[in-house]
Image (cartoon, grey):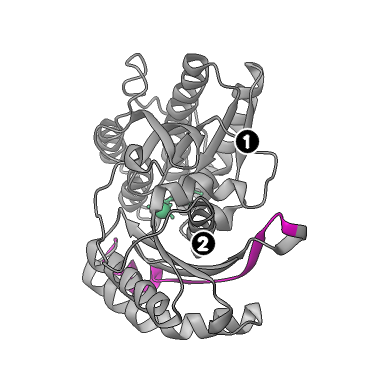
Amino acid sequence: MKVLGLETSCDETGLAIYDGELNGGKGGVLAQVLYSQIELHATYGGVVPELASRDHIRKLVPLLDELLLKANINKSDIDAIAYTKGPGLIGALMTGALFGRTLAYALNVPAVGVHHMEGHLLAPMIENEGIAFPFVCLLVSGGHTMLVQADGIGQYRILGESIDDAVGECFDKAAKMLGLPYPGGPNVERLAKDGNPHAYELPRPMLGKGLDFSFSGMKTAVHNLIKDTKGSDSDFRIRADIAASFQHAVVDTLVKKCTKALKQTGLKTLVIAGGVSANQALRTTLESSVDAIGGVVHYAPPHLCTDNGAMIAYAGHARLSMGSMDDLSVACVPRWSMESLVI
Ligand code: KG4
Ligand code: ZN
């Protein structure tokens, strides 16, 4: 089964074909294309929802043509379509959902609406056969910070989540305060490489309190630090030290919560997913801390960590293979709990 995946929940237009028959029936990504709207939103320092929707509409048709050419298949070879149904920006979601649902109707193939975070959670499995349920997943993106116990496709229990800002959002805001361009995560990581992670002590909020997170205090702490040191101005050394200290505090917090979640559930496998899981400092620190308690960490290659069409195609393929599909109506869900995804 060849599934076309469409991701349009925010500022990336991602399309991919996941083919269940590739690699001797193990499945694989036949082709993928991605258009990032970063430049479009860069001048505003963040995503402008209406501009995002309009750009998805402009890009979907030419990107589909490019994808089919890359995959060397015709539209009639598509067996099913998966689109991101939520959570995300409602206008942006509607563009992909309407495009996908309409195309599925025209081709007379099934369509399935996918939860964006389920796409992220399953993405590390696309190229890694070694990941098996059950596992604990740290989901860290621009809009979400969650610890989820994943027992199977659609079987997710939220162990903890952020009570305020998401960790990616916190990276983006810290970047902005440091005068770095959007999206902030990769730029903070780059700057942090030249800094001392122990130069400044930043708070590690809610460490003692279960598995929930809070990042708004960290943002305020960075703001105050920049004000006190005049770090947003020209001194590269100070800015690099702030970036490194901030990243160290975030990573430290995430690592402590992850090891706590593994101990609490008794599980040995940790999967990290979502845009922030591309962060190298997070990956290496988690690897050594989880290894120390006898566990193992899995993550996807960077291009499958941030938003992409392959994760939606893969999650759609998994759900369709279990008999899940949507009817003809198109209903996007801007806020949607992962715990309601049972097939
Ligand atoms: O998963 P994603 O592409 O989109 C959402 O679903 O939100 O995540 C985007 C977020 C942004 O906040 C971005 O700054 C962050 O992931 N990010 C990173 C890195 N790469 C992307 N944060 C820290 N380090 C990175 N290398
Ligand atoms: Zn995402």
Q: Is residue 177 above or below residue 203?
A: below
Percent x, y for residue 247? 45, 37
Quadrant of the image for the N terminus?
bottom right
Percent x, y for residue 320? 49, 57
Residue 313's label in the rendered image is 2
Q: Residue furthest right?
A: 24
Q: Mark 1: few, some, or many residues within 10 Å (few <14, many ≥20)?
A: few
Residue closest to the eye, 339 or 110: 110
Question: Which segment did they paint magenta?
Answer: 25-46
Residue 191 seen in the current view? yes
Q: Is residue 137 above or below residue 143?
A: above
Q: Is residue 16 above or below residue 326?
A: below
Percent x, y for residue 14? 47, 68
Percent x, y for residue 302? 58, 53
Query: In terms of secondary structure, where does tag 2 sit?
Result: helix
Residue for badge 1: 132
Residue 29 in the magenta stretch? The answer is yes
Residue 244 in the magenta stretch? The answer is no
Disc nearer the start of the sequence (1/2):
1
* Residue drawn at (31%, 73%) of the image: 98
